[in-house]
Image (cartoon, rainbow, N blue to C red):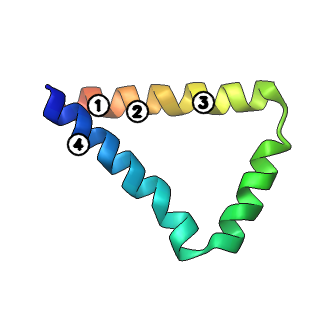
Amino acid sequence: MWNDLFAAIALVLVFEGIMPFVNPAKWRQAIRLIAEQPDVALRIMGLTSMLAGAALLYVIR
């Protein structure tokens, strides 16, 4: 179980690092746009992301 958790965290770090490595200017612009969003929009995006991840994990497992 711990190996799966650490593998998942490692994959998140890899995917999170792709955009700043490939195109740092666009990544910075995207972060700025996200930071300007209201809290409600960020919460909805976070909830949607968590639900999509949980559904994907359910389908895979």
Q: Amino acid at mark 1?
A: Leu
Tell me the amino acid under the disc marked 4.
Ala
- Among the 4 quarters of the image, the one containing residue 39: top right
Marking on residue 57: 1
Identify residue for label 4: 7
Quick check: 9 above or below 19? Answer: above
- The residue lying at 52 percent from left, 33 percent from top is 49
Quarter placement of the C terminus: top left
Q: Residues within 10 Å of mark 2 (few under 14, many from 20)?
A: few
Q: CA distance from mark 3 to mark 4?
A: 22 Å
Residue drawn at (56%, 29%), measured in percent from left and top? 48
Q: Secondary structure at mark 2?
A: helix
Residue pointed to by mark 2: 53
Question: Nearer the N terminus, badge 4 or badge 1?
Answer: 4
Q: How would you rate the neighbour count of disc 1 (Cα within 10 Å): few for under 14, some for 14-19, many for 20 or more?
A: few
Q: Please identify the quarter of the rendering in which residue 30 is found.
A: bottom right
